[in-house]
Amino acid sequence: MIALFDSGVGGLSVFKELYQLAPYEDYIYYADNANCPYGEKSVEFIRERAGEIARILISEGADIIVVACNTATAAAIDYLREKFDIGFIGMEPAIKPAALSSESKVVGVLATAGTFRGRLYRQTSGKYAQDVTIIEKVGEGLVELVENGKTDYENAGDAVMKCVAPMTAMGADRIVLGCTHYPFLEDVIRKCAPGVSIINPAPAVARHTVEVLDSAGYRFKDGKTGDTGSLKLLSSGDNRILERMAGALYRAHK
Ligand code: DGL
């Protein structure tokens, strides 16, 4: 069973990619929406939550846990790997593909404050900072918009514009989505930053998860023996939005 967790519904953007690669698997998804957003929370708090969620997912039968949250990856991935005897896949800030493909050599990164503070992000951005100008913006209010299902231009346009206008003004031709909630705003971002390529790390993280499982000898279900696959949803708060968004992405194979 493949497990994923996030502060809320954002990690569904990773689930969506994984589900395309492995549609007959059993999945379990935990949204810590009672504590969402994680962006401004302390590292200690996020570690404690991540530990508790990992315990729940392992007791539910997880074979691997995808930390489908950049902020939780930044705060807790080392801690989780040390504490539990199971594989963890974290989110990677996709600065490398953005920096290498950028023609203007100006790259915008949209993430939470917690992700920008993390060691992984600082190391990756430091590596490319000589060749490209990196413009960092905290996506103020964007996670809340996604959690409330307000992902259309009408509702989210102003908040998104505030984040991306300074990037396009500086000539950015790539915007990295450094938070798993943001792919749900991709259409709005595209409208606010026309012509800019949006880089979403979720497909690469999903591919990596499948590779890691594969090389560990995990037997993927292929639907041939009547496996229909399943998705179990857990949350620490009201899970109506989780059920609605997951339902729109998921169809059990009959
Ligand atoms: N989706 C998360 C991330 O990737 C968490 C955002 C938040 O809760 O602030 O960073």
Image (tube, helix red, strand yellow):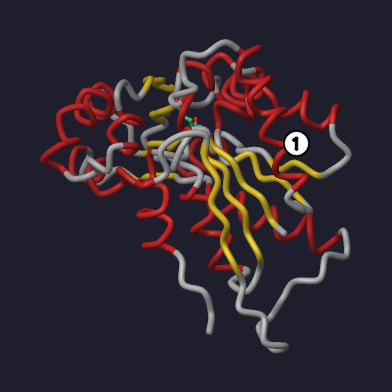
Name the one closer to the observer, 143 or 243: 243
Q: Residues within 10 Å of mark 1 (few under 14, many from 20)?
A: few
Residue 100 coordinates in the image, percent (x, y): 53, 40
Name the one closer to the observer, 33 or 131: 33
Name the one closer to the observer, 207 or 247: 247
Residue drawn at 66 percent across, 34 percent down: 53
Residue 32 coordinates in the image, percent (x, y): 52, 33
- Residue 18 in the figure: left or right of residue 187: right
Quadrant containing the N terminus is: bottom right
Residue drawn at 61 percent across, 20 percent down: 46
Work out whether 202 lies above or below 141.
below
Residue 135 coordinates in the image, percent (x, y): 39, 21
Residue 106 in sight from this viewpoint: no
Instruction: Classify residue 81 by image quadrant.
Output: top right
- Residue 70 in the figure: left or right of residue 188: right
Residue at mark 1: 55
Residue drawn at 66 percent across, 18 percent down: 119
Work out whether 104 lies above or below 190.
above
